[in-house]
Amino acid sequence: MSLLPLVLSWTGLGQVLLVLGSGLGAVVAFWTTRLLLRHAWYTHRLSCFSKPRANSWLLGHLGQMQSSEEGLLQVDDLVHKYKHSCSWFLGPFYHLVRLFHPDYVKPLLMAPASITMKDELIYGHLRPWLGQSLLLCNGEEWSRRRRLLTPAFHFDILKNYVAKFNTSTNTLHDKWRQVVAEGSTALEMFDHITLMTLDSLLKCAFSYDSDCQRSVSEYVSAVVELSDLIIERRHKILHHWDWFYWRTEQGKRFRKALGVVHGFTREVVQKRRALISQQTKSDTNLTRQQRKKDFVDIILLSKDADGQGLTDEEVQAEANTFMFAGHDTTASAISWTLYNLARHDHYQDKCRQEVMDLMQGRDRHQIEWEDLSNLPFTTMCIRESLRLHAPVQAVTRTYTRDMELPGHRTVPAGAICLVSIYGTHHNPAVWTDPHEFRPQRFDPTRTADRPSHAFIPFSSGPRNCIGQKFALAQLRVVVALTLLRFRLTPGENPDLGTGTRPGGVRRLPQLVLRAEGGLWLRVEPLNPEELEDE
């Protein structure tokens, strides 16, 4: 048992256990032995995968996984060296297989939902916020939720959201014109666009006009704080245990912000339930009105084959997930798309001309649902940006049975499969010059020979992102309107002075892909006088 003092010292619990006495020490010894045996078993089972050099047999790769530019460059090195996969473990606690080739990714993402589980390493910290929502639940409960939520993302529903995308984008652009009029042209994209996507989601989810792009919203501030606190928690191993985390200052801040978010959602759902009940008594023809309803209305009205719907608590969990999963990811995708077009002005000009041709003869510059399929080159640029700068860098899964992979490799049940979206999207065995922005890759005439799982920004298979059509629709609306009204060029962070190199952005992978110090662009209105009259 010579490893026991090392484990206790490393976790910071050694001194406490010595004080508590031999009885508790025996219990700890039992669980430590069990932990180390489990660690040895997984190490043996994963020996069929190549393993990068570890810190030690016990600590493994703890501390090597970095949420920084260097961390992404490390993934590039792993992909270059191991081609398709490697094993990885974080102390004796978490055993992972990292995968970055379509042939290895596909069997895992396409596995039946009945054997696919969301692991606690990545998703467990979201549970206090999102509850047993579609994102986090498993098995038959997941299947039921998916069936009930699918109508909320039907094309007929998405059509009604396009008007809300236009409205929130117009507010964003009004803010930009005001900033430019005051003498500043350099804008940090994430700050502006995150507020815009939150504004848009609140309209789509709750029919709620928060005015959060122009004024402080307690709810929006709480959502942003929860996202930041989850990132902090992931980086501190002791904070992974609830009994410790809730006693920390960060845990107390999390509870406070959580109270604001849950209180807001609870009130909306309860009021909407009462309103629908009242309407049902006076008007039985709800189907006729349903298309004009928002996300909460639709999932409140959804019923399964037995006539059972979601409880108020379940609706709240799904509404919270819609807000969480939709605002940051879409903001990241929009920001990086605008960044890539700013760095490649010939592509920007081609997209702009495509939008101008579409808008020709119209009195008002509003993107309609029918327009979205008439922006082929702009959509190619969006997809290439999603490949090069995917908002989510990886998804993780565990499985209730062993999973067979190519090359006679097996992932044992319970091991964490980390599907590296970044690694797959930047794998030179799959993509030529993977670090270059080349929209032509997504020309429909050139995609037939590409492996089906080479491009997975929204994951894939039965547990893919249910909101991907929503996100792509908003992306096209915001990018099209922005190019119609502004010229974009690389900018500099004014706080860093003139030494900042255009294009020298350091990527920052957190919950979504961001940029160190922000993502700065210069915006120039194309026709300020005409646009002010809209």
Image (cartoon, rainbow, N blue to C red):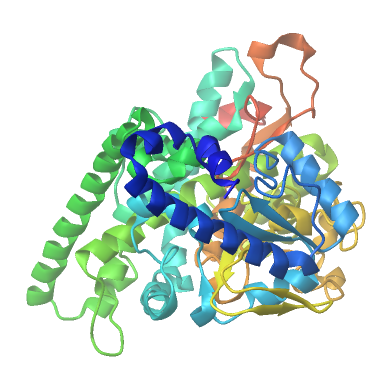
- Please give left or right for residue 16 compared with residue 368 in the image: left
> From what the image shows, is residue 147 above or below residue 447?
below
Question: For this rendering, which residue is in front, 82 or 467?
Answer: 82
Which residue occupies 74% across, 49% down? 351
Which residue occupies 86% across, 58% down? 82
Question: For this rendering, which residue is in front, 6 or 201?
Answer: 6
Question: For this rendering, which residue is in front, 421 or 44?
Answer: 44
Q: Residue furthest top?
A: 497
> From what the image shows, is residue 332 above or below residue 179?
below
- Please give left or right for residue 73 compared with residue 336 in the image: right
> From what the image shows, is residue 481 above or below residue 134?
above
- Please give left or right for residue 354 compared with residue 296 in the image: right
Q: Can you give x and y, in whole percent of width and height, for residue 290 in the image?
A: 30, 72
Which residue occupies 87% across, 69% down? 446
Residue 116's image quarter? bottom right
Q: Can you give x and y, in whole percent of width and height, for residue 167 in the image?
A: 44, 45
Q: Residue furthest front?
A: 22
> From what the image shows, is residue 77 above or below residue 67?
below
Q: Is residue 57 visible?
A: yes
Q: Can you give x and y, in whole percent of width and height, for residue 313 in the image?
A: 23, 62
Question: For this rendering, which residue is in front, 268 or 121?
Answer: 121
